Amino acid sequence: MAEQPARKARPMTRLRVLRTERLTPHMIRVVAGGDGLADFRPNEFTDSYVKLVFPVPDVRYPEPFDMQRIRAELPREQWPRMRTYTVRYYDEHAGELAIDFVYHGDEGLAGPWVAAVRPGDEMLIVGPGGAYAPAQAADWHLLVGDESALPAIGAALEAMPPGAQVRTLILVEDAAEEQALATKADAHVRWLHRAAGDDLVAAVRALDFPSGSVHAFVHGEAGLVRDLRGHLLDDRGVRKDMLSISGYWRRGKADEAWRAEKAAERQTTPA
């Protein structure tokens, strides 16, 4: 077997929390900045994502903070934990980077952190990565997701050119979780409510697709993403290269278990 090239280390940025904002009962925005933001290199994607680094308490890490060195020198249980989040916005002039967190209480890793974080606290991020931005060549755009995809959907709507035809369907718990979404596009935004029994998959299936080529962004819970993948590719004839689709989480699975399952699926999926 040919030797695999070493994986290029992604840059790490050390930020300071500037403020937090409660957008809805279950969505909290953390706005960070500080001198370290000068090291952040944005990309062209509207689903631009970073990995938040959560150091293990009472473990001393090398300075400067280097994940490759940490993995080489420390036992696995002392490696920092990481979680992936979309950059809701990056404002170079204001010196701000914002990340929106879906908050379900003081469980897991990110929930307790976002509930307790205060201005001046440190926030470590690695990245960014990304894969999707609205294609200018598309005749219209489809944006579909639940709360976990809402930051990327909001960023995509803001990036749409004036007059772009957009159909957006978003599943949230109830009306209190809806957000104002700014756009210059000709966008039709439909909110669906889980508490009322609304079905996002059924809503997409029933959607009257405009004519012409579509560029689709479909992200959220893995089960609904799986159902929509087949519908869009097989029933609607969406081109694979014009479909950004991925499960951010799986119902009934803790984050660690879902991440391991997703990694195993990637390894067994034929190229």
Image: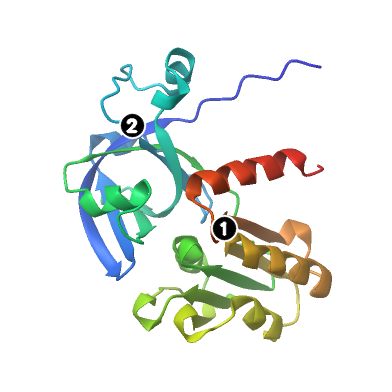
Q: Percent position (x, y) of residue 95?
A: 27, 47
The reply to whether residue 99 is in sight is yes
Q: How is this picture coloured?
A: rainbow
Task: Please tell me which residue lies in front, 158 or 236.
Answer: 236
Upstream in sequence: badge 2 or badge 1: 2
Q: Nearer the viewer, mark 2 or mark 1?
A: 1
In the image, is 139 to the left or to the right of 120? right
Question: As displayed, is residue 78 above or below residue 179?
Answer: above
Q: Residues within 10 Å of mark 2 (few under 14, many from 20)?
A: some
Question: As displayed, is residue 188 above or below residue 79?
Answer: below
Q: Going 83% across and 69% down the picture, which residue do you hit?
A: 234
What distance separates the C-alpha of mark 2 from that of mark 1? 25 Å
Q: Residues within 10 Å of mark 1 (few under 14, many from 20)?
A: some
Question: As displayed, is residue 7 above or below residue 118?
Answer: above
Question: As displayed, is residue 204 above or below residue 156?
Answer: below
Q: Which mark is residue 250?
A: 1
Q: Going 59% across and 55% down the picture, which residue do you hit?
A: 132
For badge 2, the amino acid type reads Pro
* Residue 252 in which image quadrant: bottom right
For badge 1, the amino acid type reads Arg
The reply to whether residue 42 is in sight is no
Task: Please tell me which residue lies in front, 93 or 86.
Answer: 86
Q: Which residue is mark 2?
A: 55
Q: Percent position (x, y) of residue 141?
A: 63, 71
Q: Secondary structure at mark 1?
A: loop
Task: Please tell me which residue lies in front, 265 or 252.
Answer: 252
